[in-house]
Amino acid sequence: MKLLISLLLFLNIAAATSAQTLSTVNYGSISGAVGNSQGSVSIDYFHLWKPGASKKIEIGFGARFTSYFGNSQYYSSAPASLANDVTNTDSILLVSPQVNALNLAVNLGYRLFPKIGLGFNIDALGFTLGSTKDGTYLNGTQGGSTSAKPTSFNVLLVGNNDRGTLNSEFYARYFFTEKFALKVAYQYVFTEYTTDTKIQQTPEANDRFRNKASLFSLGITKQL
Amino acid sequence: MKKIIFGVLTVLVLCCGPEDATPTTPINDTFDPTMATLLRQGNLMGSSSYTVGGVAQLYDDTGKLVLLLDNFSSSNGPDLRVYLSTTTGNTSFVNLGKLKSTTGKQSYEIPAGTDLTEFKFVLIWCQQFSVLFGKSETN
């Protein structure tokens, strides 16, 4: 959250006072990511400023579309009041979760060498679409059938207070040319489903369940 | 570009391999039904394309509830569980644990307080893919 506020402050100052003195660059990327019986496809666009004389730092914002798909994935209680204590978490098992999210995102990068760049980006705010899925609610030895749909609204907050589907990447880029780069990334994707009823009742009523996916991503970046 | 796409698909296939199946080594649990009281029982049968056989028996073993699967056999599958359920589906169930083996006599402890007249169906259930392998209505 501090990073997000810092970035927004920087962008505000940059846009208001230094637009003509800062060089900018626009990147578009398409990536495919895989993990344990799950994966994602993402398309992003970032507008980055390059402050300083060396112009090695790239900082800015953009948008990212993420389509996540999984095979038999567990989702744990999402609200921070439950997720912060594992003894308070129940779970739902979804056979074929699939969500599509469009989020505003921020990016911080550094051009380590002329051909190699490193960076981090994270979704901050957006919305998610996806169909209702049948699943199984699990509470210790007890369980039952349920159905759930993707949580519609996404927002990055502090710790487990996040809501919805949010993607983030630690990435490295290798520039074949100044225009094209191969992007390799560790992708961390939160996806969230809301059950039709508040199926969890103890220690408090809850209908939100979250999956955290660690994925390996490979993609192509083009300077636009 | 084609090589990159091929690489991504290859990794995807490698990451989505078959899940661990249930052990197939025959077992013979030590539970002795002659020392317990038989409460309910029923014959197990397979569902759709799966073969499941044997007898499901619910015992009171000096205050402890036990499910015995006797002369048991089942088709194999991933993440097979033993459920006590209110129906032949997973609408409401008690999970007794992973199926120990696809063959042999095996016992499962039932949580105290479980109402056996309500949870009267014994299911062999693939939890991962939510598929019924076998069932028995106990009477």
Image (tube, coloured by chain):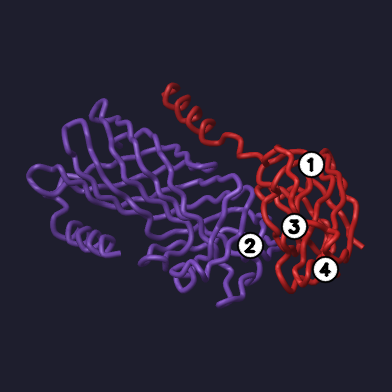
Chain colours: A purple, B red
- Labelled disc at residue B116: 4
- Circle 3 — which element? strand
Q: Which residue is mark 3?
A: B83
**Amino acid type assigned to the residue bearing label 2 in the image:** Leu
Single out the mark in the foreground, 2 or 4: 4
Single out the mark in the foreground, 2 or 3: 3
- Labelled disc at residue B74: 1
| Badge 1 and badge 4 in a common chain | yes
Farthest residue in the top direction? B3
To which chain does the residue with label 4 belong? B
**Amino acid type assigned to the residue bearing label 4 in the image:** Leu
Could you tell me how far apart the alpha carbons at marks 3 and 4 are, in whole angstroms? 12 Å
Residue in view at x 30 percent, y 64 percent: A1
- Circle 4 — which element? loop
Could you tell me how far apart the alpha carbons at marks 3 and 1 are, in whole angstroms? 15 Å
Q: Which residue is mark 2?
A: A138
Residue B135 locus on image (x, y percent)? 84, 52
| Badge 3 and badge 4 in a common chain | yes
- Circle 1 — which element? strand
Could you tell me how far apart the alpha carbons at marks 2 and 1 are, in whole angstroms? 24 Å
Single out the mark in the foreground, 2 or 1: 1
Give whichever of discs 1 and 4 has the lower sequence position: 1
Give whichever of discs 3 and 4 has the lower sequence position: 3
To which chain does the residue with label 2 belong? A
For the residue pair A135 and A106, the one nearer the viewer reads as A135
Give whichever of discs 3 and 1 has the lower sequence position: 1
Whether pointer 1 and pointer 4 mark residues with C-beta atoms closer than 8 Å, the reply is no
